[in-house]
Image: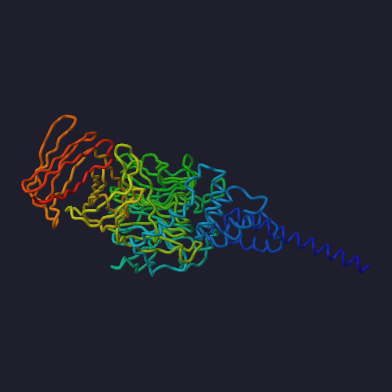
Amino acid sequence: MKRINCTILFIGILLISTSVKAQMSDRANKYFESFAYQEAIELYEILWQKDSLNESVAKRLAISYRMINNAEQSEQWYARVVNMPSVEIDDFLHYAKVLQSNKKYDKAQIWMNKYMKSDPEAILNFIDPVYIQDLMNDSIRYKVQVIKANSEASDFGVSFYKNQLVFSSARERRMLIKRNFKWNNQNYLRLYEAKVEPDGELSEILQFSDKLATNYHDGPVCFNEEGDEMFLTRNHVSNSKRVKRNQEGIVSIKLYFCKKEGHKWSEPELLPFNMEGYSTGHPSLSSDAKSLYFISDRPGGFGGTDLYVCHRDENGWGKAENLGSQVNTSENEMFPFITGTQNLYFASKGHPGLGGLDLFSIDLNQKDTKPVNLGYPINTSKDDFGLILKNGKGYFASNRLKGESFDDIYKFSIESKLIRGQVFQTNTNEVLGNSLVTLNDENGHPIETVTTKENGKFKFFVRGGQDYQIRSVKEGFIDGEALIAASYLKDKTEYSTLVYQATDNALVLEGLVVVKEGQSPIEGLTISVYDEQTKERFELTSDWEGKFSCKLKRETLYKLKYLKAGFMSKYDLINTYKLLRNRIQIRKEFYRL
């Protein structure tokens, strides 16, 4: 009887345990599906301890840690996932990305190559250790410092506002009811304004506007130059002050417009180019206030969030225009910033970089140009984004220090600008290597000279503020030149140029005549040059240095005769058939009579 009771008790405990486990699994899945990743992780970790063969739990832990930007933990879980029978191709991609974020570039390259075998078009995801090292090499260009006013929570989304800054922050604040964003368990974002000190530090930080604050995310924002128009990103809230979710349960962001009326801002109005069910945000206004750049995940893009522009005229706002495949990728492009010279800065996970979100720039004035990675120390293996720039100084955000979703604001200055270039042959458009390339200032004075390698590439660091000239010289080619105006470098961290050199068919004879004894130059010696083809003859005379020169024709045989009273005469033959070089140099010694 006791044995039966024990068996019943054991079965009962087992059923209760199974029921508790099922309830915990259901709760974890609900957290996961509602994007409350922090809560989901806590429950999935317990479930994994109870069942370390559950592939679904491992996969969801890998995803959850990735979604809160915990690359270290995400790597550990993806290392399990990629070796499970249920592994999917995209798991290779995500594993490679978190390895890259953890600076394990060689291992990341292996897993990225596995992913690319299944998707050959995913060339942008290629991890090139040589390119990564190149991004690390030019760190002297920038001076980067984390600002002292950062909080323990996230601070990012900086915008110029008159002579102040406005930014978004999840920092602690006094409130009767504390409400957290379930995705990362931080406070919802609020807008703050700050005074800019002479050294770029921020002080006197205050909440930007109580009237504009909602119970959800507010920011980032941007302003016109006068500071009386504001474009505001916020969670889409209904008239009942509740967030509106799309069919997938995601709370989208929308762009709103406010006008300053006296000392107060008007009630935010939805901009007409928002799209129902999709996100639109991260605004940046052109200096003439006629073009607004922003992000959106609306249909018709290239994947993830894309960058768009909308133009304004006297009739209002036009249609949203996608910036195209030069800028957008299948991954996320975010946080645009447009300068007065139409140089666009943005963050991307799709273009090749150091890992996470990297910052890029592209000159919208130029066609067929590619985004330029700003390199280290602006970019790191973590998320770097939200750059703004004015007069060579600016701000951006990064989670390089605290990791996960804890972003800090950094100040930076451009210490020098990088001029990159490459030399090509005009006739064939092929790369021309081993040229002597000189950087001259606007007065034509040489600053620096380098010799290119076989790839024809060169680079110079400059301060900017003046025009520069680049001259490329190589034997057998006409000198190549490129002019870089000061305006080309404004609002840029680097500029790329191409230099072309055409084949030089000219052939020059350069000669030197000296006395055998003592090697002193012979002045006034006559050199008679006879063309065997045309039967033409011309004469040269050596100068006080004993030098003479002239142009010769190719595919020709010349006879030379050297004459001067008091010296023995000499004869010479010069054959220019199939001669590749551009110069013939001869040296003759003469005995006195």
Query: At which x and y percent is residue 578?
Result: 28, 36
| Coordinates of residue 323 in the picture (x, y in percent) | 39, 43
Q: Quadrant of the N terminus?
A: bottom right
Residue 296 as seen in the image, left or right of residue 443: right
How far across and down, in percent of the image, does residue 566 sit?
A: 6, 48
Picture layout, residue 561 above or below residue 439: above
Q: Position of residue 468 (x, y in %)?
A: 22, 52
**Residue at figure coordinates x 18%, y 43% from the top left:** 509
Q: Is residue 75 above or below residue 558?
A: below
Residue 211 can be seen in this image: no
Q: From the viewer's perspective, is residue 453 above or below residue 175?
A: above
Residue with the most extreme top position: 534
**Which residue is rendered at x = 24% and y = 46% of the image?**
481
The residue lying toward the viewer, choosing from 470 and 555, is: 555
Residue 39 or 527: which is nearer the viewer?
A: 527
Q: Decide: is 24 above or below 569.
A: below
Q: Is residue 517 shown left or right of residue 299?
A: left
| Res 135 → quadrant | bottom left
Q: Is residue 366 left or right of residue 29?
A: left
Check the image and name the residue furthest to the front: 593
Answer with the quarter of the image where residue 51 lies: bottom right
In the picture as drawn, the residue positioned furthest to the left comes out as 565
Q: Nearer the viewer, residue 130 or 428?
A: 428
Q: Is residue 316 visible?
A: yes
Q: Is residue 429 left or right of residue 176?
A: left
Colour setting: rainbow
Exactly how many numbered labels are in the figure? Answer: 0
